[in-house]
Amino acid sequence: MRKNIVAGNWKMNKNLQEGLDLVKELQSAVFGKTLKCDVVVCTPFVHLASVSGLIDKNKVKLGAQNCADKVSGAYTGEVSAEMLASTGAQYVILGHSERRAYYGETSVTLSEKVKLALANKLTPIFCIGEVLAEREAGKQNTVVKTQIEEALFDLSADDFGKIVLAYEPVWAIGTGKTATSAQAQEIHAHIRQTVAAKYGQTVADNTSILYGGSCNAGNAKELFANPDVDGGLIGGAALKLDTFMPIVEAF
Ligand code: PEP
């Protein structure tokens, strides 16, 4: 069956020392606890190897926030999926709305990134979600379906089964506005149904679908109580132990 996951997305926050301090705190906080979810920290690239050396990966798992859409070679400034895997990273966030909006990521490049991540045994946390105007026009279901179809539906069922999805309404990211629990459940169920229609109910039932967008200690319990919400992708609240741990413990 599918896993519950709480993944922190640090974005472009924390220098190396600050990042290591937070990871040490997190590691101590989860030590000896029986958690009902996997805990993942998605750090900036330059922190990955150091964080990897510090964590017990049975307790805290490691992810990156992006990877290149090319295998290797003359692509100055890029970081390949193979390089990420070589640091000990296990996950990679792909298709975050900030990357789509600020760095022009499209379904075409994302499809390449997903395949390279999978080829290197990284689990993609693939982000989908509508902007406010699309939600106001009632187009959210079509938008997320298209995002999944375009970037992921050329995968085999076996490969699709290795992916984690994160529904992140763009209007809720970093804004303090959260989708209501009912809105989250409704669209997560739609996403699962979209997967089932293509790959069958078993693959759909085994796919973890995380919610992201101003998730915090106050709303995580209610969001995670929904049958189709399997955890969270957490931005701002992942930057401090005392705002992240209550979310981890919300299951
Ligand atoms: C995110 O960027 O993935 C996110 C969910 O951010 P926040 O929790 O800050 O809204």
Image (tube, rainbow, N blue to C red):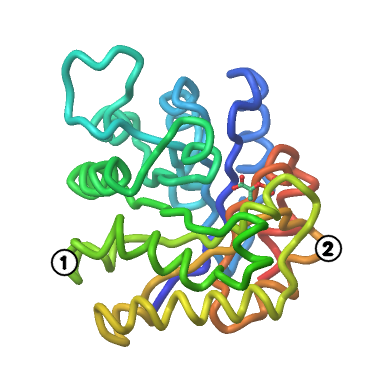
From what the image shows, is residue 175 above or below residue 102? below
At x 72%, y 49%, the residue is 244
Contact, mark 1 vs mark 2 (Cβ under 8 Å): no
Q: Quadrant of the C terminus?
A: bottom right
Question: Residue 163: percent from the left, percent from the top?
Answer: 34, 60
x, y percent for residue 26: 65, 42
Ligand 1 contact, mark 1 (Cβ < 8 Å) = no
* Residue sitting farthest toward the front: 137
The residue labelled by disc 1 is 156
Residue 207 vertical placement versus 235 (above, below): below
Q: In the current view of this chain or complex, which residue is farthest to the right?
A: 218
Residue drawn at x 57%, y 84% as measured from the top left? 227
Label 1 CA crowd tier, 10 Å (few <14, some 14–19, many 20+): few
Q: Residues within 10 Å of mark 2 (few under 14, many from 20)?
A: few
**Mark 2, residue position:** 218
Q: Nearer the viewer, residue 114 or 219?
A: 114
What residue is rendered at 34% in x and 34% in y? 67
Rounded to the nearest angstrom, the CA distance separating label 1 from label 2 is: 38 Å
Quarter of the picture containing the N terminus is bottom left
Q: Nearer the viewer, mark 1 or mark 2?
A: 1
The three-letter code of the residue at mark 1 reads Ser
Q: Quadrant of residue 140?
A: bottom right
Q: Earlier in the sequence, mark 1 or mark 2?
A: 1
Looking at the rendered structure, the kind of residue marked 2 is Gly
Dividing the picture into quadrants, the one containing residue 11 is: top right
